[in-house]
Amino acid sequence: MNLAFAYEAVFPQRGGAETYLADLLHRLVRDRHEVHLYAVDYDAASLPQELIHHPLPPRRAPRFLRPWHFARACEQAIPLHRHDVVVGLIKTWHQDVLIPQGGVHVVSARENLRKHASFGMRSLAWCVQRCSLSYWSFRWLEQKQYRADRPLWVVVPSRMVLGHLQQSYSVDPSRVRVIPNAIDADRMTAYDRPMLRAELRDRLGIHPEEVVGLFCGHNYRLKGLGPLLRAWARLKGSAQLIVCGGQNVKPYERLVRDLGVADQVHFLGFVEEVRQPYFAADFLVHPTFYDPCALVTLEALACGLPVITTVHNGAAELLPPAMQSHVISDPHDADHLAWHIQQFCDDAYRQGLARSARQAAMAWTFEDHYQALLELFAEVARRKQAA
C-alpha cells in the first residue's frame, strides 16, 4: 500500500508517540509498503532510509497557533500526491485514519487537573486552564478533527479512551477501532541483561540483592512522581527507587531531601540506553493521572517487571489478572500506594508476578497490533477506491 503519515517532528528518543511511530514506520518499510512522512523535521538516523519525506515549512508562531499551521500545511501538501491511506497522529484534520495517541484533548485537559492534591489548587488550575489560549485553540482544532467533512476512521489505544471519545464527540461507532498500543520487543532484547543490571546498580551504589523500583516518564508531575516519593518515604528504607526520563529534577531533589529519602532515590534524567533502568529494576511504579495507554507499562511487562499503575492509564487493561489488584484509583493516597509497593518488596510474591508479566507481554505483541492496523488500512483503502 501507499501510506502517508502526518506528524510535525519525529524524534523517537523523546519517547511516547514518536517511539511508536518510528517502530511502525520501520515495520511498514520492511514489508515493502511505500511510506511517506509529512513532517517539519525528523531524526533521519532513527527512521528507515527508504522513507519518503515531504518537508513542510516551519512556522514561527505562538504555541497555540503552531498546530493550526502544521495542519493547514498538511491539508495543502497531501492532496498533491496519491495515497491509499493518510494517517494522522496529532492535531491534523486532513486524514483518513486518526490515531489519537494523546487521547481526547478535552478529557486530557480535565484529567490533568487531578495532579493537584487539593480542591483549591484544582479549582485555581481550572481557572488558569480556561484562560489559556492553547486550551481553547487545541479544543477547537480537535472539534474540527472529529467533525471533518470527509469520512474518518479512529484508532483508540484503550477502552478508556473509547469511552472518552463517546462522551465528547458524536463519532460513528462503526468507524472506531480499539487497537491497544504495543512495543517492538526487539528493542528490549535481554541477552546482556545481567551485565547492564550490574553496571547501573554498581554506578548508583545499589547492592545486587536490594529491591529496586523504577519510575519512568518525562512529565514528572502528570505521571505522579510527587505522590510516589511521598509513598516511598513511608517504606522506611525497604527499597531503592530509580527515576528516569525527565530533566527538571531540582524540585524533586529538594522533596526527597525534605522527606529524608535522598539516599534511596536515584535521578538519572534522560537515559539513552532505555533497557538499562528496566533491567536494573525489579518492578515499575507508574502512578499516572492520565495516560491513554502508557508505553512504559508495556516496556516493563516485556522485561518481566510487575507493574503498579492507576485506573487513569489505559494500559492497565492489558495487565494480567494477577496484577489487576495493583491498579489504584487515587495516586495521591500515599499510604495506599506505599502498601502496594511494600507487597512488591516480597521476593516470592514479586517473582510470581514477573512470570505473569512476561506472559502478558506475549499475549499482545507489536505483531498483533501491526496486523490489526494493516487490516484497517486495507479496508479504508478499499472503501476509498470504491467511492
Image (cartoon, rainbow, N blue to C red):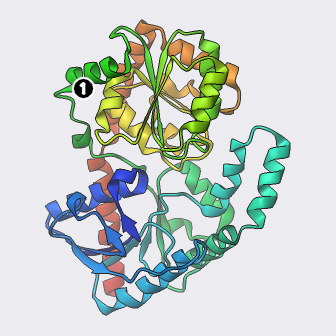
Q: Position of residue 96 (x, y in %)?
A: 41, 77
Mark 1, residue position: 196
Residue 387 visible in the snapshot? no
- Identify whether 125 is placed above or below 138: above
Locate residue 281 relative to residue 52 in the image: left or right. right
Q: Position of residue 335 (x, y in %)?
A: 69, 19
Q: Quadrant of the N terminus?
A: bottom left
Q: Position of residue 225 (x, y in %)?
A: 58, 34
| Image quadrant where residue 114 sits | top right
**Which residue is at 32% across, 33% downward?**
302
**Which residue is at 37% across, 57% downward?**
18
**Which residue is at 45% across, 10% downward?**
349
- Identify whether 332 is placed above or below 42: above
Q: 361 and 177: which one is in front?
A: 361
Q: Mark 1 belongs to which amino acid?
A: Leu
**Which residue is at 36% across, 90% downward?**
79
| Image quadrant where residue 222 sits | top right
- Identify whether 260 is placed above or below 125: above
Q: Quadrant of the C terminus?
A: bottom left
Residue count near mark 1 (Cα–Cα under 10 Å), binned few <14, some 14–19, many ≥20 = some
Q: Position of residue 52 (x, y in %)?
A: 21, 76
Q: 28 and 364: which one is in front?
A: 28
